[in-house]
Each structure stands twice: as structure tokens, then as C-alpha cells.
Image: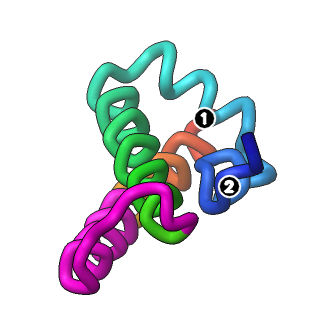
Amino acid sequence: MSHTPHELADEFPQDHAVLHRLKMEDAHFARLAEEYHEVNREIHRIESEVEAASDDRAEELKKQRLALADEIGAIVAKARTAA
């Protein structure tokens, strides 16, 4: 399978340890990360034409991914300064 763009590790390349720690220690963060992963994979399937979707659905998913990335980014930034 090809590399899926926009994985959290790609979005936060300097924060691998922080991401891992948060996934292990923070249930809310783990749920957000899982939701991000699911949405990102669905977008990738649509863009790869493996799965059909309307333009509106694809845009809705991209907005959802961006909102999740923003929330995750805020948590990562806070955890980075606390560590």
C-alpha cells in the first residue's frame, strides 16, 4: 500500500515522542488521533479513487481533518511546553 499523506507523524515531524506519550496517557487525545486517522484514510481512499464520494463529502471530510489537526496541534503544543 502506498504512503498515506497527512499522517500525524508527517504533520508533526519533530513531535513523535510527544504524540506517542499523549496517545498512551491521554484518552481524549487518543480518540482525537484515531478519528483523525480514520478521516484521513477516507480522504486518501477518495483521492486515490478507491472510494467514490461527492465533492461536497470530500470537502466536508477535509474540513473535519483540518479541525481535528488544529485541536491536536494545540494539545501537542501544550504538551511540548510542559515536557
Q: Is residue 73 visible?
A: no
The residue shown at (80%, 51%) is 14
Q: In the image shown, does 65 or 26 lie closer to the viewer?
A: 65
Q: Amino acid at mark 1?
A: Leu
Q: Is residue 38 visible?
A: yes
Instruction: Pick the quarter of the image with the N terminus.
Output: top right
Location of mark 2 (residue): 12
Q: Counting other residues with Cα less than 10 Å from the Cα at mark 1, is it few (<14), some (14-19), or many (20 or more)? A: many
Q: In the image shown, does 47 or 37 lie closer to the viewer?
A: 47
Q: Counting other residues with Cα less than 10 Å from the Cα at mark 2, is it few (<14), some (14-19), or many (20 or more)? A: some
Q: Which residues are magenta?
A: 48-68
Kind of element beneath mark 2: loop
Q: Position of residue 74 (x, y in %)?
A: 43, 58
Quick check: is 14 in the magenta stretch?
Answer: no
The residue shown at (38%, 42%) is 38
Please, what is the dominant secondary structure of the magenta stretch?
Answer: helix
Location of mark 1 (residue): 19
Residue 44 disc label: none
Which image quadrant is residue 40 in? bottom left
Mark before the other along the chain sequence, 1 or 2: 2
In this picture, residue 53 sits left or right of residue 50 = left
Which image quadrant is residue 80 in? top right
Q: In the image shown, does 64 or 73 lie closer to the viewer?
A: 64
The residue shown at (59%, 22%) is 21
Which image quadrant is residue 58 in? bottom left
The residue shown at (52%, 59%) is 44
Instruction: Pick the quarter of the image with the C terminus.
Output: top right
For the residues labelled 1 and 2, the Cα–Cα distance comes to 8 Å
Kind of element beneath mark 1: helix
Q: In the image shown, does 67 or 25 lie closer to the viewer?
A: 67
